[in-house]
Image: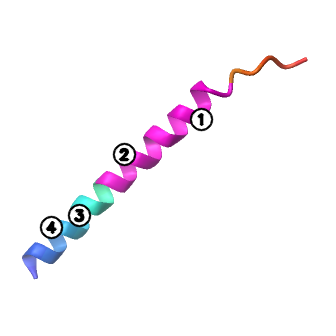
Amino acid sequence: MVIFFDVLFGVCVVATFWFAGYVVYRVLNDDTPRR
């Protein structure tokens, strides 16, 4: 069971970093000129 929770924690951390990176990527690439 310890391995299961270890994997679950790892997946949560990776998902959090992936989501944060995705949000930052979207914000940085949303510099289209507003008229």
Mark before the other along the chain sequence, 1 or 4 = 4
Give the crowd class for mark 3: few <14, some 14-19, many >=20 residues within 10 Å: few
- Looking at numbered disc 2 in the image, what kind of residue is underneath it? Phe
The residue pinned by badge 2 equals 17
Q: Could you tell me how far apart the alpha carbons at marks 1 and 2 are, in whole angstroms?
A: 14 Å
Please say whether residue 20 is one of the residues in the magenta stretch.
yes
Mark before the other along the chain sequence, 1 or 2 = 2
Q: Secondary structure at mark 4?
A: helix
Q: Is residue 27 above or below residue 7?
A: above
Give the crowd class for mark 1: few <14, some 14-19, many >=20 residues within 10 Å: few
The residue pinned by badge 1 equals 26
Q: Quick one: quadrant of the C terminus?
A: top right
Mark before the other along the chain sequence, 3 or 2 = 3
The residue under the point 15% across, 67% down is: 6
Please provide percent x and percent y for residue 28.
Answer: 58, 25
Q: Which residues are magenta?
A: 14-30
Q: Which mark is residue 6?
A: 4
Q: Is residue 34 above or below residue 25?
A: above
Please say whether residue 29 is one of the residues in the magenta stretch.
yes
The residue pinned by badge 3 equals 9
Q: Could you tell me how far apart the alpha carbons at marks 4 and 2 are, in whole angstroms?
A: 17 Å
- Looking at numbered disc 3 in the image, what kind of residue is underneath it? Phe
Residue at the far right: name it: 35
Q: Secondary structure at mark 2?
A: helix
Q: Main secondary structure of the magenta part?
A: helix
Mark before the other along the chain sequence, 3 or 1 = 3
- Looking at numbered disc 4 in the image, what kind of residue is underneath it? Asp
The residue under the point 40% across, 47% down is: 18
Mark before the other along the chain sequence, 4 or 2 = 4
* Dot 4 and dot 3 residues touching (CB under 8 Å): yes
